[in-house]
Amino acid sequence: MARVFISYRHVEPDTSLARALYARLSDADHDVFLDAADIPLGAMWDKQIARNVESADYFIPLVSASYLHSPYILHRELGPAADRLRNGKLSGLLQINIAYDGEPPDAVRDVLAAIQFVKWRSAADTATVLDQVGQALPQ
C-alpha cells in the first residue's frame, strides 16, 4: 500500500479523471488523498494539503494548461513534490498530461521534463491511464 497524493485543477476534465483515479487506487487499498474527498468541513484546507504532500510516497499531478497556470498548485503542491523528488524523499511522481503538450514552468521543468508521463486526450483514454498508474504503484 502506498500513500498517494492526487494533484489536479478543479475544472473538467481534470476533476473527473482525478475522481476516477481516486476510486481505482482506493479500491486497490492505497491510501489516497484527494482534497474533495479527504478534507472535512471546517478543516484548515491549506494545512491538510501541505501535510499530505509532505507525507505522500507518490505524487500524481494531472498536468493541464490550467493546472500549470495555478500559482497555488505550483508553489504549494507541485513545487514541494518536485523538491521532495529531487531530494530522494518521494518514491515517485506519476505525471498524467491532460491534453497538454506545452513546456512546464522553469521551477519544475527539470523534474517534469525528465519523467516519463502518460497522456490523456479524451475519456476513451481513461481506462488505459488508470491501468498504467495502478501498475506503477507497489502492490
Image (spheres, rainbow, N blue to C red):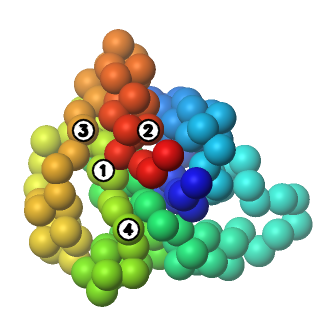
Pointer 3: residues within 10 angstroms few (<14), some, or many (20+)? some
- Kindly identify the residue that appears in the image at 44 percent across and 61 percent down: 58
Report the amino acid beneath label 4: Ser
10 vs 80, nearest the viewer:
80
Residue reaching furthest bottom?
Answer: 87
**The label number, if any, that marks residue 80 in the structure image:** none
Residue at 12 percent of width and 60 percent of height: 113
Q: Where is residue 71 in the image (x, y as percent from the top left)?
A: 40, 69
Amino acid at circle 2: Gly
Q: Can residue 19 be seen from the camera position used here?
A: no
Q: In this view, does 18 lie above or below 109?
A: above
The N terminus lies in which quarter of the figure?
bottom right
Q: Which of marks 4 and 2 is nearer the N terminus?
A: 4
Amino acid type at circle 1 is Gln
Quick one: SS at disc 1? loop
The residue wearing badge 2 is 134
